[in-house]
Amino acid sequence: MAEEDPSEVSIVIEGNKVMEGCGSRTKACVLLMGLIYSLNLEYPKQYTFEAFQKLFLELDGGKLQKKVHSLKNKLMQ
């Protein structure tokens, strides 16, 4: 299914816009993962980055925190 072409897609980390004009949500997700690794960002307490990396990208999925594991179980139902 083709992704809608939004007028503007940006990456915001901790309330700061760090990248503008990403082109699509898919490309923004890829760029976000690159930023997380290149800037060696720590995961925030909300588990957003961890869930994105471990559940959706299936990277290092064997080591899940309790809340992320609970989310995975709910998604698998």
Image (tube, helix red, strand yellow):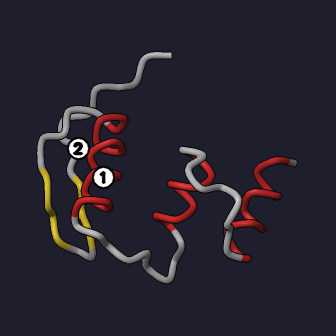
Q: Position of residue 8 (x, y in %)?
A: 18, 41
Which residue was labeled with disc 2? Answer: 9
Instruction: Count neighbours of disc 1 (C-alpha within 10 A) and say few if under 14, some if 14 to 19, many if 20 or more.
Output: some
Identify the disc placed on residue 4: none
Q: Nearer the viewer, residue 38 or 70?
A: 38
Q: Position of residue 67 (x, y in %)?
A: 70, 75
In terms of secondary structure, where does tag 2 sit?
Answer: loop
x 67%, y 75%: residue: 65
48 versus 21 height, above or below: below
Q: Quadrant of residue 5?
A: top left
Amino acid at circle 1: Leu
Q: Is residue 12 left or right of residue 53?
A: left
Which residue was labeled with disc 1? Answer: 32
x 36%, y 45%: residue: 29
Q: Is residue 44 left or right of residue 32?
A: right
Q: Is residue 3 left or right of residue 21?
A: right
**Disc nearer the start of the sequence (1/2):** 2
